[in-house]
Image (cartoon, rainbow, N blue to C red):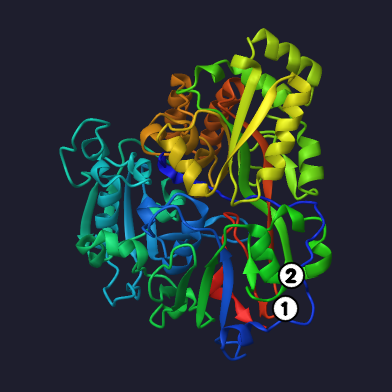
Amino acid sequence: MRLTKTMRWTALAACTALAISACSTGGDKKSSSEASGAGSDKKGGSISVELGEPQHGLVPQNTSESEGAEVLNAIFAGLVDYDIKDNSPKLRVAESIESQDATTWTIKLKDGYTFHNGEKVTAQSFVDAWNYGANQDNAQEALPFFDKILGSDELAPGKDKKPTADKLKGLAVVDDKTFTVTLKAPFSQFKTMLGYNAFFPLPKAFFTDPKAFEDAPIGNGAFQIDGKWEHNKQIKVKRFENFPASDGKAKLDSVTFKIYDKLDTAYNDLRADNIQITDKLPISAMATVAQEFGDRYIYKPDSGVGYLGFPISTNPAFASPDLRKAISMAIDRESITKTIFSGTRKPADDFINPIIPGYRQGALGDAAKYDPAKAKALFAQAGGLPGNTLEIGYNADGGHKEWIEAVGNQLKANLGIEVTFKPFEKFGAILTALGEHKYSGAFRMAWSMDYPSIENYLRPIFSKVAIDNGSNYGGYVNEEFEALLSKADAAKTDAEGIKLYQQADDILVKDLPYIPVYTYMSSAAYTKTVKNVNVNAQGQMDLANVELA
């Protein structure tokens, strides 16, 4: 993610309370079928949906952000999937995933899955993809996800060192439908994590020309790419006719992911039925979207957590935990979520999202309590900031300007500092700047789970392994935190593991490498021309089940 972006950084922004802009909802509406030129048959038709420009090429092992993952979720099928109601893992391409000791796992595949070019999906398809993702020479963002597999150290020995192997010792193909995975140590969450896109299979064609694959990926999912990714414009997919009926073939003929720079523009297109679904809404829509869209407005708990982050390792100004706690206590989370987000976000009180087993209400303690007087005293005691100034960076394509400026104004008023803002045009741009250590100010960030586990809110964002190859953009290191993660990984029961992960969470609460500000609610909407629209806890549309109304 770059740290493994195992967990996926989310570009989601949020909605808010400004008056809806003057876009018309009246007479120029077109039905989706008219807009697409498709018929009204519920078994077919074409729609368009909102998307932000993905950061990288559409390779599962190199995608750790929300926009690319949205497309990959439509064109790939993984070993497991997650129940859209309770997030529990359920087998998909895998017939079984079994282990007696949580260290050696045997994975058997179902029949019937092929890639879109006709190649059969086999055990080798997974093993080849994982070996590629684990090799640091390939610079894949999902590399940290393979760190638990035996032999990963040889493929990823670290910066300025060369790999001494090209295959993971812990992977072994038994036959076309069976492979085994041996981990370095027991990891009870292994089966759960296998639904994440880092573990998707790759066809042989990928290894022939990886660069060409980035714009025209060949997946094994319900939709297949239609043409090539037209950057900053659109990505078109169409139903894969040979997808197994037992997994549920796509009902639509095709879907166009229309790429937007601004959520307000996408929302206006939704209101005009130029697109039919968006799973991200601009802040300007928040106050009125429920009234306007009624039961076509989806509002439910989402796995995301929004943070204010700090580049601890590269900017000594942010080194003091007390200074970070003072900043946290100077933020009025209730006001931000109610005023800016019109109640469509919840104040964060833990590093763990409330929908995940292991979340503890109020775990952040005093750090989450709005107390300007104590915050100012603690800020002074911690030595303040150089020049009494703070810069906060954010991506401008996600609707974050309003809440970041609100936070900045609170810090200015409560701590007596000057706050400036640095917008990055694209979400990918701020990720790249942070990853290359070219930005040293505080920054807006958010995390949406890769898989439903408390571990996924800890290791991918705050562990050492996530610094060079994952999502630890702050460069945070705490050996006690690392040791607790290892103990939790090896727990013999879920309950024991959760208790140990919570102890690791307590270390974060003390150190505050990031400040959790709010947790997300899914805010999606769709037009009258489609039905069966749903969004999973990762904020991704379940496009295979969407039909024309």
Farthest residue, direction left: 164
Q: Position of residue 333 (x, y in %)?
A: 76, 35
In the displayed structure, 347 sits above or below 179; it is above
In percent of width and height, residue 494 lies at 52, 40
From this view, report whether residue 320 is shown above or below residue 476: above
Q: Secondary structure at mark 2?
A: helix
Q: Badges 2 and 1: C-beta atoms under 8 Å apart? A: yes
Say which label, 2 or 1, has the lower sequence index. 2
State the residue position of label 1: 528
Residue 247 vs residue 371: left or right?
left
| Of residues 355 and 261, the one drawn nearer to the viewer in this rendering | 261
Whether residue 386 sits left or right of residue 417 in the image: it is left
Q: Residue at (69%, 14%) from the top-left corner?
A: 379
The kind of residue on which mark 1 rests is Lys
User: Can residue 289 be seen in this snapshot?
Assistant: yes
Local packing at callout 1 (Cα closer than 10 Å; few below 14, some 14-19, many 20+) is: few
Residue 199 shows in this picture: no
Quadrant where the C terminus lies? bottom right
Instruction: Give the answer, above or below, for where 3 lies relative to 252.
Output: above
What residue appears at the point 68 percent right and 29 percent down from the top-left corner? Answer: 363
* Helix, strand or loop under label 1: loop
Quadrant assignment for the N terminus = top left
Question: Which picture quadrant has residue 338?
Answer: top right
The residue carrying mark 2 is 296
User: Residue 257: image x %, image y %?
Assistant: 52, 69
What amino acid does circle 2 point to? Arg
- Checking the image for residue 354, the label placed there is none
Q: Is residue 487 left or right of residue 178?
A: right
